[in-house]
Image (cartoon, helix red, strand yellow):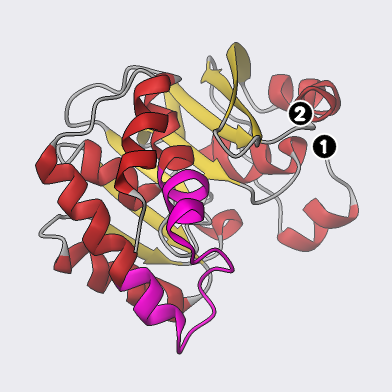
Amino acid sequence: MVNTALLKADAEKLGILINDEQLQKFELLSELLVEQNKTMNLTAITDPDGIAVKHFADSISVLTAYDIPKGARVMDIGTGAGFPGIPLLIMRPDIDLVMVDSTAKKLKYVQSTVDSLGLIATTLHTRAEEAGQSKDYREKFDVVCSRAVAALNVLCEYCLPFVKVGGMFIAMKGAKAQEEIGDAKAAIKLLGGKIVAEKSFTLSDGGERTLVVIKKISQIPPRYPRPSAQIAKKPL
């Protein structure tokens, strides 16, 4: 179900070593993903190479952007079928992971998959802009990450409210990262963030990736995040 040799090779190029136990979990994850995808629209990528590179290697690349502290509270916003969250958890079972999505059906799959892998994580069925105003989640996380959810200026309004001061937001971006960074500079400053690193690399399938690491340096103004209609109508 997954090309484990390709996954190991891509991970090693990123400087990440996957042990046999982790590899077995990635194999099980791919089986569960492909099986569940037959009755549910989780992903268009179901071939062994695509899963290895586009889902698994891409997800664990987050580990190269920032040295996540042991036991850190981590949030994956817009997790969908569990990416990057579940692969991160396979590599770092010590993290306290919360995976957020607005689609309950996908989260049910994500939770059952985490359980099947013998791992522990929390799933949260909510809209990010609503949870970002909740005292239970606002500025409570050491690391927040998100993959392919929205343009960076919009994504920052969804994600930075969850990051505690001194914590990191890691935005996983593709080939247009530099353009998005330029458009997001004002939003990042307004939302209490500062870009501290940009890590670009190419996956073995030729896919260009950039991890944009934004440090939270001050508290976010209370009015953010705004309701989704306002975010869409007037992005920062």
User: Which quadrant of the structure image shows residue 31?
Assistant: bottom left
Residue 41 rendering spot, x and y as whole percentages: 54, 79
Q: Look at the image and tell me whether residue 224 can be seen.
A: no
Residue 210 rendering spot, x and y as whole percentages: 63, 26
User: Which span of residues is magenta-colored?
Assistant: 32-56
Crowding near pointer 2: few (<14 within 10 Å), some, many (20+)? some
User: Which quadrant of the structure image shows residue 209?
Assistant: top right
Task: Please count the marks in the image.
Answer: 2
Which label number is shown at residue 236? Answer: 1
Q: Secondary structure at mark 1?
A: loop
Residue assigned mark 2? 187
Residue closer to the observer: 70 or 231: 70
Q: Secondary structure at mark 2?
A: helix
Quadrant of the snapshot with the N terminus: bottom left
Q: Is residue 46 magenta?
A: yes
Q: Is residue 123 magenta?
A: no
Residue name at image x 89 percent, y 48 percent: 234
* Cβ–Cβ under 8 Å for marks 1 and 2: yes
Inspect the image, locate mark 2, and give the three-letter code of the amino acid beneath it.
Ala
Vertical relation: 150 (above or below) 30? above
Residue 22 rendering spot, x and y as whole percentages: 17, 43
Which secondary structure dominates the residues rendered in magenta?
helix
Residue closer to the observer: 38 or 157: 38
Residue name at image x 28 percent, y 37 percent: 73
Residue name at image x 36 percent, y 51 percent: 3
Inspect the image, locate mark 1, and give the three-letter code of the amino acid beneath it.
Leu
Residue 138 rendering spot, x and y as whole percentages: 45, 42
Crowding near pointer 1: few (<14 within 10 Å), some, many (20+)? some
Instruction: Tell whether 156 sits left or right of 81.
Output: right
